[in-house]
């Protein structure tokens, strides 16, 4: 097996993306959920805590004189949902939007249809054990232990200095205890979220390195991909040869329309056509070197077209003017002299004045 030492091509990355393979870290979603949740507790959490406090106080106050039956439970549940439901629902929606946004930002709005569907291979227990005890499984285990240690250390460093405050919660009223507990939870969530974000960024960098490493290609694979994208070199050569042959046949078919063929005398040949009524300047309808030049001259002679030897003009036309293009103004005088000579030979009116 060839060593895969080359960076992946853009096409390889696009194909992988179409298969749903992109760089993504689940830790970024977790960090976003922690931080957004903490910020929501700071803003909307007070209303939620107040609603929960009212629910507890109301429930405790109404239980002694209430007849607890199905109707009472249904009414009580409806009231509690109406109190805490809107705030809790809004928090859940924002958390969902945050999670989706982080996922889309990582995958660049990937919608991989090939990843959809049921795959029996995912239920293979043997494959599952292989993943667990593979090198990647050990890496995931190390990451889990690192996350546990990080969260534990951050939580311990915060709670260590708040032990007395936690113990004092039992000696305060419910409203104060609830507020203190919410403040502590928000502080803990913010710090854990910030630490987790650092871990998530490092994990994303690792996931990107691992993905690009898995996408590496061998030199043979790059050559094969180039052949697929550009086509087989032999086939391309045949196509170009066929195109040249067709273009040459079309060019030869235009030689009988020429007024004159200027030669070098045997190395080059340029066929010119000029109609003063429809053309602004003479046009090159065919040109060639060596064998092609000889064929152009032979076709011209067989069709009664004059073949004039003029080495400087032939060289200049062959080098400067493409087929089906008009001659440049700086060559008007030289070509006009040739055409005037040809028109005199054929007894036609000279077109020199029109150039």
Image: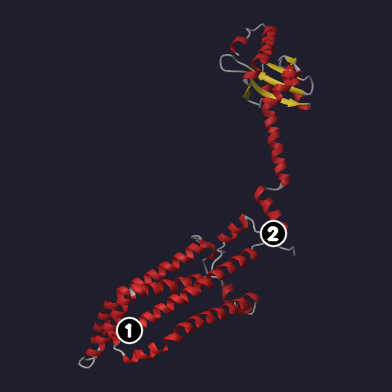
Residue 56 left/right relative to 5:
left
In the image shown, does 308 or 64 lie closer to the viewer?
64
Image quarter for residue 236?
top right
Q: Position of residue 248 (x, y in %)?
A: 70, 30
Q: Position of residue 10 (x, y in %)?
A: 61, 55
In the image shown, does 1 or 202 lie closer to the viewer?
202
- Quadrant including the C terminus: top right
**Local secondary structure at mark 2:** loop
Residue highlighted by disc 2 = 6
Residue highlighted by disc 1 = 178
Q: Position of residue 144 (x, y in %)?
A: 56, 79
Q: Residue at x 32, y 92 (%)?
A: 171
Looking at the image, residue 63 lies above or below residue 124: below
Q: Residue at x 67, y 51 (%)?
A: 228
Q: Position of residue 238 (x, y in %)?
A: 72, 41
Residue 138 left/right relative to 152:
right
Crowding at dot 1, Cα within 10 Å, few <14 / some 14-19 / many 20+, comes out as some
Q: Is residue 70 visible?
A: no
Task: Measure how far apart labels 2 and 1 are at the Cα level.
Answer: 59 Å
Q: Is residue 168 visible?
A: yes
Q: Residue at x 67, y 10 (%)?
A: 340
Whether label 2 touches label 1, CB < 8 Å: no
Looking at the image, residue 21 lies above or below residue 126: above
- Number of marks: 2
In the image shown, does 153 or 295 lie closer to the viewer?
153
Looking at the image, residue 310 lies above or below residue 129: above
Residue 38 circle label: none
**Local secondary structure at mark 1:** helix
């Amino acid at each position: 097996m060839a060593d895969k030492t080359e960076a992946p091509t853009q096409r390889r990355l696009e194909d992988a993306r179409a298969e749903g393979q992109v760089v993504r870290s689940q830790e970024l979603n977790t960090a976003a959920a922690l931080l957004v949740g903490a910020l929501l507790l700071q803003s909307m959490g007070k209303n939620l805590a107040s609603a929960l406090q009212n629910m507890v106080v109301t429930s405790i106050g109404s239980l002694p004189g209430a007849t607890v039956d199905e109707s009472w439970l249904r009414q009580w549940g409806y009231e509690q949902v109406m109190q805490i439901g809107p705030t809790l629902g809004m928090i859940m929606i924002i958390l969902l939007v945050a999670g989706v946004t982080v996922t889309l930002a990582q995958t660049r709005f990937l919608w991989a249809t090939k990843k959809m569907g049921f795959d029996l291979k995912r239920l293979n227990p043997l494959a599952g054990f292989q993943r667990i005890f593979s090198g990647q499984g050990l890496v995931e285990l190390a990451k889990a232990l690192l996350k546990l240690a990080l969260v534990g250390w951050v939580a311990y460093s915060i709670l260590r200095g708040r032990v007395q405050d936690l113990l004092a919660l039992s000696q305060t009223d419910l409203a104060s205890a609830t507020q203190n507990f919410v403040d502590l939870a928000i502080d803990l969530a913010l710090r854990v979220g910030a630490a987790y974000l650092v871990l998530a960024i490092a994990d994303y960098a690792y996931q990107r390195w691992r993905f690009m490493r898995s996408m590496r290609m061998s030199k043979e694979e790059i050559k094969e991909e180039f052949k697929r994208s550009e086509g087989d070199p032999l086939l391309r050569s045949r196509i170009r040869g066929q195109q040249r042959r067709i273009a040459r046949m079309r060019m030869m078919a235009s030689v009988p329309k020429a007024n004159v063929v200027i030669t070098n005398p045997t190395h080059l040949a340029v066929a010119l056509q000029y109609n003063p009524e429809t053309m602004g300047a003479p046009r090159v309808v065919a040109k060639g070197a060596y064998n092609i030049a000889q064929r152009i001259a032979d076709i011209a002679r067989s069709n009664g077209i004059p073949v004039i030897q003029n080495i400087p003009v032939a060289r200049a036309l062959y080098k400067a003017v493409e087929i089906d293009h008009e001659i440049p103004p700086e060559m008007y005088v030289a070509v006009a002299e040739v055409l005037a000579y040809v028109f005199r030979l054929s007894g036609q009116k000279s077109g020199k004045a029109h150039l």
